[in-house]
Structures are given as C-alpha cells and as structure tokens.
Image (tube, grey):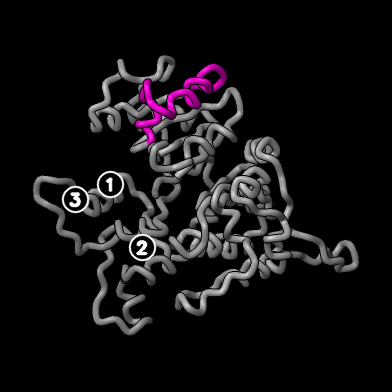
Amino acid sequence: MLHTVNKSPFESTSLKTCLGLAQSGSDILLIEDGVYGALAGTIHTAMLAQATGTISVYALGPDLKARGLPEDRLIPGIKVVGYDGFVELACANDKVQSWL
Amino acid sequence: MPGTRYFRVFFYHDGVNNGTRLTTPPQDDRHIVNRWSELSKAHDLDLVVCVAAAQRRGIVDPDEAKRNGKDSDNIAPGFRISGLGQLIEAGIQADRLLVFGD
Amino acid sequence: MSETKKFMYINRRPPYGTVYPLEGLEVVLIGAAFEQEVCMVFISDGVFQLRQGQDTIDSGMKNFSPTYRALGDYEVTRLYVERESLEERGLTEADLMPLTWEDEDDDWAEKPSIQIVSRAQLSDLLEEQDVVFNF
C-alpha cells in the first residue's frame, strides 16, 4: 500500500497515525506540508527515522523545494521523487491511502 | 502520464470550490479553475462536483439554479454537478482511488 | 458487473468543529445503496463522533448523532473503534452510543455494531480493503 501524508507533524497527528497503521513493506510518500516530517533534527525525526528500516519513505521534490528544504537536511534513507515518481508509486502499489 | 487513464475527478467538501467560474486570482498566480477546465478539455476528463456539497457552498449550474430558485449560476466549463453515487461508482470501477484535500 | 469490493470509511475528526464527519456520513449512506462490503473505522478524534449525549440545542447546530443509529438499517453493521484512541482520550465503550443492527439471518436478533479493536488489528484490516475513504 502507498500511504500519503500531507500534514506537518507539528500541526497534526496524521504522520503518527499513519506510522501506527502502516505495515512493513509499504511505501510512505510525504507531500505538501507533510514534507516537514522528512526533516532531520526535529522533535519528530525519531518516529519516522525508525520506520525507514522496514518502510520505504519518499518525499515529493517540488514540495520540498517550494518550502526551501534542501535534500541534505532530510532524514537519511528518505528518497526524493518528482510528480512522475508519485504516479509510479501509485501504480506500483495496489492501493493508495491518503492521510489528510 | 502516458498509459494512465482517469475514470473521474470527483470534487467533495471544499473541493467543490474548484468548480466556480467566478474566481479572480492575482494575475501573477495560477488560475486553478481555468487549469481544471483546460485539463478536462485536453484529456477528456470527467470533472464531477458533488451536488450536496455544492448546495452548501453555493456552486450552482443552470439546472440547480432553477431547481432551488437562485438568480444565477456559476459552474465553470468542463464541470458537471451530480450525486455522491458518482464517487462510489468511481471507487468500484477504477483500479486506484487517490484522495487530495484537507 | 464488477465483483463486490471492500470499502472502508476512516473517520479521524471530532463532530461539529468541521463539516467532515457530517459530509463523511453522507457518503456512507449513499454508498450503502451500492451493496459493497463496507465498514467504518473511528480513530484519533473520530471516536468522539460516537460519544453519546450530544446535545446541540444551545449551539444551534444540527445534531446529526442520531444518524449513526440508522446505519444498521443501511446494512453498515461494522463500526470499528480503535482502543488506543479511546484510552488516550479517557473514554470507554460505555461512553459511546449503543449502536445496534438486526441480523435477519439470526431471527432479527439485535447485535452491537461497534467493535473495539486494537491498532494492530486495524492495521491488518486496512490492508484487506480495496477502497479507502478518509474523512
């Protein structure tokens, strides 16, 4: 399953709820304000960093760039993809769960 | 994206506001409503606005205007107003459902 | 005609502060006519939607909590409530509306619609679905 999270972990529990329910082997794509969850060195970093062991975590490049978040400030292991990568992830998984 | 087909784009909750032709965004920013209308034309997309959510928020087509006694309509080109059944039908018939919103 | 799909409606928001719980319920009720295999999930603040004793008179808002009681008649008989979400909010099952449905295969016996499940169980349930909506 592909999970998308579009809220900042500082604003909403969406990322936390997603991590609580996503199974190992699934993909998580952070989009819109959700990309703030990809940042290293924050109070929320640990919960996502922990997940990268069993879950593939992606962040949407255009949303990172829009917010001035450079790739070298992200949690190691998070892959940056473009809109085409988003579509590929949606096609590669049998369903998409959007945590709004 | 080549090879991908979109069964329908369904607008619900505040998403129905994408369907009014009366927006005037700043000149230096995107005209989202027009972009939907153009995308719909270019790719033959079925853009459906939920009638219940539209009624709540004042998105009206000519039929709805007549039915509810409104003095005008504001639906943008390319959009049509219909029921929630269209969303469920899309969920049943499509291979994937993607949801964007708040 | 395509075969039946498993539909899950996930509810994460409390009632009245936003329109999402009400409009979400409308989707569930309309969806009931399509005879798919449906269930509803209440997690995070969504569990508050099922809290009994909602009295909206002084607020002027429409009290839509009675609508949950009608779900059984629409054959929406599985309402999963996450145990962890209840506990985090100091709630127990006794705080929720006693929602039931009538099982025609069991002499119309009245059965509870709400099932308290763990996060782990919900995770498995989510994986089984074909179509998931979030409100």
- When the figure is inspected, residue A49 is found, relative to residue A34, above or below; the finding is above
Mark in the foreground, 3 or 2: 3
What's drawn in magenta, residue-wise? A34-56
Q: x, y (%) of residue C43?
A: 59, 48
Chain identity of mark 1: B
* Marking on residue B80: 2
Helix, strand or loop at label 3? It is loop
* Marking on residue A95: none
- When the figure is inspected, residue C25 is found, relative to residue A42, above or below; the finding is below
The amino acid type, in three-letter code, at marker 1 is Leu
Q: Are marks 1 and 2 in contact (CB under 8 Å)?
A: no
Q: Residues within 10 Å of mark 2 (few under 14, many from 20)?
A: some
Give the Cα distance between marks 3 and 2: 19 Å
**Magenta stretch: residue A51 in it?**
yes
Helix, strand or loop at label 1? It is helix
Reading the image, the residue beneath label 3 is B31
- When the figure is inspected, residue C53 is found, relative to residue B69, above or below; the finding is above
Q: Earlier in the sequence, mark 1 or mark 2?
A: 1
Residue drawn at the location 40% of the way across and 30% of the way down: A37
The residue closer to the viewer here, B6 or A12, is: A12
The amino acid type, in three-letter code, at marker 2 is Arg
Residue B102 visible to an observer of this rendering: yes
Q: x, y (%) of residue B88?
A: 54, 56
Residue drawn at the location 28% of the way across and 66% of the way down: B75
Q: x, y (%) of residue B59?
A: 31, 68
Reading the image, the residue beneath label 1 is B39
Give the Cα distance between marks 1 and 3: 12 Å
Helix, strand or loop at label 2? It is strand
**Residue A12 found in image quarter:** top left
